[in-house]
Image (tube, grey):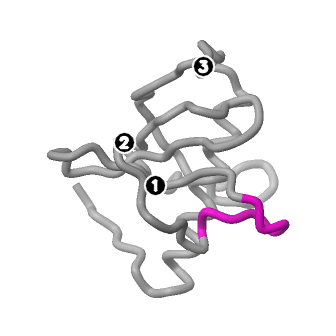
Amino acid sequence: MNKQKENSNTDQTKTQSKRYAFAQRQGDDFSCIKLLEGQYEGIIYKYNQVKFSTTENATGEIPLKFTYDIMANPNKEDIKSDDFRNYIGDILIECVEEQLKNGTFNIDDK
């Protein structure tokens, strides 16, 4: 997989550390995310279906639902755990917020 030459703003946490980068294999028509630090370093995954729930949760928020595929898991981490799902869910929210901010968010009703 090739990494982009430069991380976008969504690739940075508030402390300016780079937790992830977008990656794409030559010939693929989708991008993946490669985790760059911490327990999940080296994992490469892609989001599949991403959608907003039709109902609010107990705190009055509309949850973001998603599925994902693991493309690489070099350290054999537990990628089915709630901890991992929450971690990549936070990254997804960062990406959506950035796209909303810069006007590039696109909703596909398929």
Q: At label 3, which amino acid type do we have?
A: Lys
Residue 77 is labelled as: none
Mark found first going from the N terminus, 3 or 1: 1
Residue 71 spot, x, y in % from top left: 40, 28
Asked if residue 82 lies left or right of residue 106, the reply is right
Measured as percent of width and height from the top left, residue 19 is found at 68, 51
Please give left or right for residue 31 compared with residue 86 in the image: left
- Which label's residue is closer to the chain start, 2 or 1? 1
Q: Residue at x 62, y 17 (%)?
A: 75
What segment carries the magenta color?
A: 10-17
Question: Which residue is label 3 attached to?
Answer: 80
Mark 1 highlights which residue? 22
Q: Residue furthest front?
A: 5
- x and y percentages locating residue 54 in the rendered image: 51, 54
Magenta stretch prevailing secondary structure: loop
Asked if 72 appears above or below 1 in the picture, the reply is: above
Which element type, helix, strand or loop, lies under badge 3? loop
- Label 2 – label 1 distance at C-alpha: 15 Å
Identify the residue shown where x is 48% and y is 35%. 44
82 drawn magenta? no
Q: Identify the mark nearer the N-term, 3 or 2.
A: 2
Q: Which residue is mark 2?
A: 48
Gap in Å between the C-alphas at discs 3 and 2? Answer: 15 Å
Labels 3, 1: front one: 1
Along the horizontal axis of the image, is 76 left or right of 70? right
Q: Are marks 3 and 2 in contact (CB under 8 Å)?
A: no
Compared with 108, 73 (above or below) is: above
| Residue at (40, 80) in percent of width and height | 104
Q: Secondary structure at mark 2?
A: strand
Q: CA distance from mark 3 to mark 1?
A: 21 Å
Q: Is disc 3 in contact with disc 1, using a CB cutoff of under 8 Å?
A: no
